[in-house]
Image: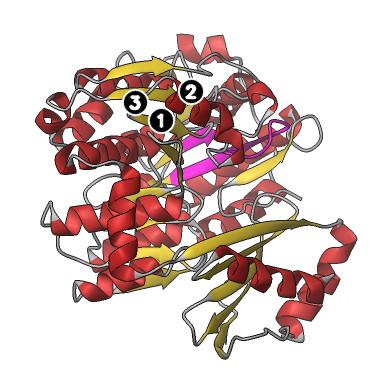
């Protein structure tokens, strides 16, 4: 059974992610396109640098071409934001990215992108799953599809994408700052576009972990605190102004300040929203998912704006951002987008906007964050993952979602509980704790936010004790 989660279909390589299933998914996409009468335009296919990604992209192309659907292809790997941009910019119906994003190296997957460069909706992926179940795969050799004119190769795939970002930045303020930046693409596909933009902005840039490595150096290609230990060390020891990291397919961002502080995604979101609203003059609300910091609510309220909460899944963020003409939308896992750009996560634009903010304000990230903390108070998030065996999931669902049990929380008063996406408990103090099943891995994710880390950890431990 092939199922699409919040980030597409992801599976373990050699187990479920194999040629047979990849081709079944591709045929299901063809049949879904036919049912929607949307086969007349080519499909943009991209792939990251994971093991089997390039081969899987070719297999998908072979199936699409056998069904009479033209394909746009690249001679190199591409970050997910680029494929989303091309779908939007060229007004295509569909795009496909072969990626498992920030998952462990033994995973790979397929992400379906729909019109306007958006993540496929739940309704779309549910319908697609039905077509995959009934798929009767047709395929034709890649070279024959090229000869038949069904596959075309993009000669300059990055140009319009890079120009679009440049046009939305104050490049002069960056050029005049003379920043020294250490960039860690985590062996992924985001190297070229961000390097090009940083060089265009006259930054001095050094690279680490830029080679293709199917095992991502033995780490996860996720720009989290533990994965960026080496970047932190080099930034401090070699006196860089900033360290930037992006995940395996270039849609999530991590920042290391010049003093070695890890600037987490929640902080990035708050700082960029504040900067765009107060210094760029972009008026409007902000959007976050329900596992993201409530500090955004406090900042928005101080502006007389609203912060909209949506379920986990960037499709919900982009839809609400569009509906409310929000300034920015993002999530605590490192993904964000900004008004006027693509409707998906883009670490490349986010990184450049963050650099612009530092240059425009003439302050370090830690200095900006301290000013915001002094103004709005302390919001500290903790998180943990519970691994479980497949046979344990029904018991957890029964406890949390059916019986709706919640633990006793010492020194906290529960004000409401939401089951919109997992179980989120809100407290009178402004703290919260949420547990929900991962859409891409066999994990129960637990997030909590409070005024300090010990309080946030205590909320998580109370939930874990109840479930275990």
Q: Which residue has dot 3 on it?
A: 194
Q: Which residue has dot 2 on it?
A: 234
Picture layout, residue 253 above or below residue 195: below
**Residue 51 shows in this picture:** no
Q: Earlier in the sequence, mark 1 or mark 3?
A: 3
> Number of numbered discs present?
3
Tell which tag, 2 or 1, sits nearer the viewer.
2
Residue plotted at (19% across, 28% down): 163
Which percent across, then down, holds residue 145?
51, 16
Distance from Cα at disc 1 to Cα at disc 3 = 13 Å
**Residue 108 colored in magenta in the image:** yes
Q: Quadrant of the C terminus?
A: bottom right
Residue plotted at (32% across, 69% down): 376
Q: Earlier in the sequence, mark 2 or mark 1?
A: 2
Distance from Cα at disc 3 to Cα at disc 2 = 19 Å
User: In the drawing, what numbered circle is on residue 390?
Assistant: none
Decide: marks 2, 1 in contact (CB < 8 A)? yes
Decide: marks 1, 3 in contact (CB < 8 A)? no
Which percent across, then down, holds residue 162?
25, 27
Q: Which residues are magenta?
A: 96-113
**Residue 243 shows in this picture:** yes
Most foreground residue, 83 or 272: 272
């Amino acid at each position: 059974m092939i199922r699409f989660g919040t980030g597409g279909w992801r599976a373990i390589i050699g187990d479920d992610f194999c040629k047979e299933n990849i081709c079944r998914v591709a045929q299901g996409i063809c049949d879904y396109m036919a049912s929607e009468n949307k086969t007349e335009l080519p499909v943009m296919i991209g792939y990251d640098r994971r093991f089997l990604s390039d081969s899987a992209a070719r297999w998908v192309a072979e199936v699409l071409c056998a069904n009479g659907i033209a394909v746009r292809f690249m001679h190199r790997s591409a970050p997910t934001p680029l494929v989303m941009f091309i779908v939007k910019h060229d007004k295509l119906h569909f795009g496909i990215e072969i990626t498992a994003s920030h998952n462990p190296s033994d995973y790979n997957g397929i992400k379906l992108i729909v019109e306007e460069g958006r993540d496929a909706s739940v309704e779309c992926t549910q319908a697609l799953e039905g077509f995959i179940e009934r798929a009767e795969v047709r395929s034709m050799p890649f070279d024959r599809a090229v000869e038949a004119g069904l596959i075309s190769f993009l000669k300059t795939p990055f140009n319009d994408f890079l120009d679009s970002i440049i046009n939305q930045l104050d490049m002069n303020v960056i050029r005049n700052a003379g920043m020294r930046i250490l960039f860690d693409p985590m062996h992924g596909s985001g190297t070229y576009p961000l390097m090009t933009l940083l060089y265009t902005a006259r930054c001095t840039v050094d690279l680490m972990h830029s080679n293709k490595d199917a095992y991502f150096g033995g780490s996860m290609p996720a720009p989290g605190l533990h994965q960026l230990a080496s970047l932190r060390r080099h930034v401090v020891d070699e006196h860089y102004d900033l360290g930037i990291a992006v995940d395996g397919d270039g849609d999530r961002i991590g920042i290391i300040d010049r003093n070695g502080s890890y600037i987490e995604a929640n902080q990035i979101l708050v700082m960029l929203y504040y900067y765009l609203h107060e210094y760029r003059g972009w008026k409007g609300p902000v959007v976050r998912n329900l596992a993201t910091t409530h500090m955004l609510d406090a900042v928005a309220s101080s502006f007389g704006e609203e912060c909209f909460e949506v379920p986990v899944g960037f499709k919900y963020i982009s839809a609400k951002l569009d509906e409310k003409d929000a300034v920015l939308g993002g999530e605590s896992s490192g993904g964000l987008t900004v008004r006027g750009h693509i409707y998906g996560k883009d670490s490349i634009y986010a990184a450049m906007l963050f650099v612009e903010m530092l240059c425009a304000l003439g302050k370090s990230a830690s200095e900006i964050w301290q000013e915001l903390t002094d103004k709005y108070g302390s919001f500290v998030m903790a998180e943990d993952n519970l691994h479980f065996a497949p046979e344990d999931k029904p018991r957890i669902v029964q406890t949390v979602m059916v019986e709706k049990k919640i633990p006793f929380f010492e020194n906290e008063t529960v004000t409401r509980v939401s089951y919109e996406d997992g179980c989120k408990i809100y407290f009178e103090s402004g703290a919260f704790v949420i547990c929900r099943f991962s859409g891409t891995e066999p994990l129960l994710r637990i997030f909590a936010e409070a005024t300090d880390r010990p309080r946030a950890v205590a909320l998580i431990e109370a939930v874990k004790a109840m479930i275990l």
